[in-house]
Amino acid sequence: MTSRIDRISLLAVPGLAYLAVIYALPLLILLAKSIRTPDGISFAEYAAFFSDDYNMGVLLRTLRVAALTTLLALLIAYPTAFAMNRAKGPMLTVFLVAMVLPMSLGVVVKAFAWSILFRANGFINTSLQWIGLTEKPVRMLFTETALVIGAANVFLPFMVLPIYAVVRQLDQRLPEAAASLGATPFFRFFHVTLPLTLPGVVAGSAFTFSMAISMYVIPSLIVGERQQTLSMLIARSFLYLRNEALGSTISAVLLAIAIIVVVFSSWLARRLEARQ
Amino acid sequence: MKRQFSAGISRRTLLKTSAYAAVGTLAAPSLLRASSSEIVIGCAGSHTAWMEQIVAPHMKSAIGADILFEGTKSSVNLEKMASNKDAPYLSVVQMDDPVMIQAVEAELLTPITADAVPNMTDLRPDAVHMDGMWCNYVQPWAGVAYNTDMADGVPSWAALWDPANSGQVIIPSLQNTEGMWTLFVAAMLGSGKPFAEAQYEIDAAFAKLEELKPNLLSVYSTMSQAFNLLEQGEISMLAGNFSSYTLPRKAEGVPVDLAAPSEGIFAMPSGICLVKGGPNPELAQAYVNEMLGETMQAAIADFATSVPANTKVKAGAVIPDGVAIYSPDWAFVAKNRRDWIDRFDKLMAV
């Protein structure tokens, strides 16, 4: 039995080796660069980063945009996952294709499409004025709102699919049992359905938040240089300021946030599973 | 004891095969690039069209070179050269003068000599820099691009600050070399001094730039996107754009034009250099020689609407009459650019 486990665990070797060389090693080098100075080990770059109002503004914007993107994606994905669960045959195929196909379209193409949508005489502004909600065009291009909408669109499949995987395994008899005991639809949703699907929500949120917090191309194209995010600061530090220590420091901060999100979501998922 | 997997492959065989496959995969690009007729050229992303349509076919027939272009920003090319200093993979890089200065300081370049590149003797004297460390091969001119459906022209750079143009202007980031033109114009307008003195009045420039914020829709680092918005009529003016980009679009019938405001225009500094220790040095020198020769100079200058550097060539863009054309103190720019980028980003932040 032990021998069989050993053999199966060998299958993880290529993946682990790949991650060690391509992911962990460069990160360790980055971390070393962020604290290494000619005078020895120092955390001065971290102190300088956190004491700069501009950097703190960028950090807060990055967190806010990632949180709002995750929230918007969740609001769209949650009902979508239930609709997919109900869908059968060709309809389910349509759902899955609609989820996966846009991922094959480059972000650059999408960003250009969004600029057409969001511009002063674009579809949204024209519709708002036609309905009578606004008298003149509302500025949407290069705003945080446009960024959140665009990012949620890109990351939506990563929220839908984990929730769909959990919803598919949901025992439909449980809400029915609650209904037979007199529970209202509202009560059934918040006390039966939602708790049972929370592991999918946690997994989808962790995916989406982690990707949204580190996105680079999407904010570069949608909001430009006036509303930088942490990833844009990293690129700027390495490529334009040629300040490796600053770039490494910001990378370490971003990595720390990502680790906190992953560890917290894993802990939360385990807790939810244990409770069930 | 030798342990066998169910398919009959031993663990040692599996590991050896995996190792060979990994080494083969990692080595493939190097093996392919070892081809003696191939050289990798770093160039500006906006040059990709004429590099592919004009330069690549010519180099194949003239010197038998297979050209691989890597189009990106000058700063990114510099980073690629610095990161691969011990084992360069780029043979030639075409980038802007201020970044060339940084490359020389980092000892990343090898001089271009008349012995190896005879065509450099035909260049304008001001097109050869730092004893041949790099040469300018063409020079587009930069002014203000505008949408012809929205404006009749841009007589003065001050139009960028006109309250009538609120939310209608995009300027380049200082990460892009063309971003310097708005900074220097702000210095001239803010200090009231002529360009030669104003280019050093950076505090006055930033104070004037701050006044521009209400008129800005955005600050770009990707020019094509900003230009697209100009073409769509989302903005009326795009500061610091250049003849090699705007005028070909105008020729295609797009409602855009490039204005040469009365205060003056700027010479875009397009340089070419040899990478120190780069692969295929003879082929790299032959490539540079062809780029500076009459045939390529005429073709590029015409296609990219630029001023040729070779004095024997009469083609390409014509500098607008009666307007001063400026070329800044690039050494001063190279020395201060990082601080300016940081200051600019903080100033322009929403």
Image: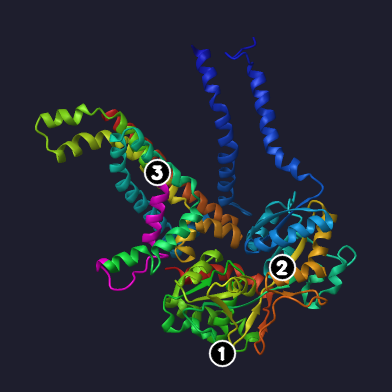
In percent of the image, x 48 and y 46: which residue is there? A255
Question: In the image, which is nearer the foreground, mark 2 or mark 3?
Answer: 3
Quadrant assignment, res B270: bottom right
Quarter of the image where the C terminus of chain B is located: bottom left
Quadrant assignment, res A62: bottom left
Q: Check if residue A15 falls in the magenta segment.
A: no
Q: Residues within 10 Å of mark 2 (few under 14, many from 20)?
A: many
Kindly identify which residue carries mark 3. A98
Amino acid at dot 3: Ala
- Which disc is residue B314 wearing? none
Question: Could you say whether the residue bearing mark 3 is in a helix, strand or loop?
Answer: helix
User: Whole-Å distance between the Cαs marked 2 and 3?
Assistant: 50 Å
Whether residue A114 is visible, yes or no, is yes
In percent of the image, x 41 and y 53: which residue is there? A151
Residue range (magenta): A131-156
Quarter of the image where the N terminus of chain B is located: top right
Q: Is residue A243 above or below residue B3?
A: below
User: Whole-Å distance between the Cαs marked 2 and 1?
Assistant: 29 Å
Q: Position of residue B327 (x, y in %)?
A: 68, 79
